[in-house]
Image: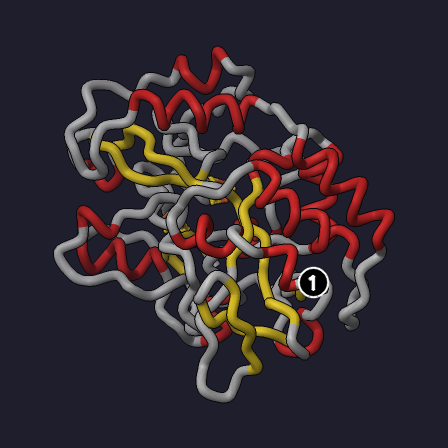
Amino acid sequence: MEVNCEGCAGCCVDWRPVSPEPLDHERRRGRVPLDDAYNLVPLAREEIGRFVDAGYGDALVPRLWHPETRDDRVTVDGHAVAAIEGRPAFVVGLRNVPKPVAPFGLDRRWLRTCVFLDPTTLQCRIHDDRLYPGECADYPGHNLALEVETECERVERVHGGTRLRDRSDPPTGHLRLGPEALGTRVFAHPEPARLDGVVARLVARDLRPADRAEFVGCAVGSTPGSLAVDDERAATARRRTRHASSWVGRSVDDWTAVAGRVDEHAPDANGRIEESNGAPPTPGWGADGGKD
Ligand code: SF4
Ligand code: SF4
């Protein structure tokens, strides 16, 4: 597999506002999320733990789903949510926030992007870090293996150019499906009553640090292949997440304070916001334009 990522970031940006065709699908087929994030990166349990331990709990966000007909379900805050044995099912991914970006050669504008995307270079700030998610390292390998359209192909179709240079031998080392995903990538919250008010705020894009920490704690405390949650591990991760104050969280606050309307013209990339908060720099593009 080979991709041409320079000037793209299609898999890190919610570019629905600049697409003439509806992009209402996620990276892969599946249930409809309660939130409206595009291209949320689902993290594995050990990855979530690493983010928490590194002080990046404030970069994480939960996702729940509308139940499909055959799904178990519970109702929280008036919303039916997909469940496993009466426990709300969820994944944990990376937050997104409006940043001034210029993907695909477009004029710079405000679009929601992954918190780790450098808006100037359109490169990932944790690409060479041990925190780099396996899902991103493999991308778009899982789509290719599952024979669903990749973001690279959508970008080609809408904005031209060649993004997916070679689709052979897609990497799938981090793909987890079905029962194998339980407790490793898909989790179940043990006490739906603790989510009163939280689900309503998730739908309203108004989650508080304690709300996000509630899910992160359960994910870190989860047990592979089981619904069991270790209370002590969960409480420690919940506390660390609740009190995290990384450059990511500070930058989300700063971007939110200055952002224009989504898709509104943005005068410059304002890379100073993240770097003055302590974000690591990105190297810029070499000659090959390979994976970000
Ligand atoms: S992986 Fe594909 S969609 Fe993502 S930046 Fe590279 S070319 Fe674009
Ligand atoms: S972690 Fe990096 S590669 Fe993955 S979505 Fe975020 S910016 Fe993109």
On the image, which quarter does residue 211 sit in? top right
**Horizontal relation, residue 20 to residue 228: left or right:** left
Q: Position of residue 235 (x, y in %)?
A: 79, 44
Q: Is residue 130 visible?
A: no
- Camera-side residue: 58 or 72? 72
Q: What sort of colour scheme is used for the picture?
A: secondary structure
Q: Secondary structure at mark 1?
A: loop
- Camera-side residue: 8 or 227? 227
**Horizontal relation, residue 185 to residue 163: left or right:** right
Extreme-bottom residue of the structure: 70
Q: Is residue 246 above or below residue 20?
A: above
- Residue drawn at point x = 45 percent, y = 86 percent: 69
- Camera-side residue: 231 or 57? 231
The 10 Å Cα crowd at callout 1, few under 14, some 14 to 19, many 20 or more, is few
- Camera-side residue: 113 or 77? 77
Q: How many marks?
A: 1
- Residue drawn at point x = 23 percent, y = 41 percent: 104
Q: Is residue 131 above or below residue 63?
A: above
On the image, which quarter does residue 254 sit in? top left
- Residue drawn at point x = 16 percent, y = 33 percent: 264
Q: Is residue 131 visible?
A: yes
Residue beneath disc 1:
191
Q: Position of residue 125 (x, y in %)?
A: 51, 30
**Horizontal relation, residue 56 to residue 222: left or right:** left
Q: Position of residue 147 (x, y in %)?
A: 43, 76
**Is the distance from the Cβ of mark 1 to the nearest ligand 2 atom less than 8 Å?**
no
Q: Is residue 131 above or below residue 33?
A: above
Residue type, numbered disc 1:
Glu
Extreme-left residue of the structure: 20
- Residue drawn at point x = 70 percent, y = 73 percent: 180
Q: Position of residue 100 (x, y in %)?
A: 28, 28
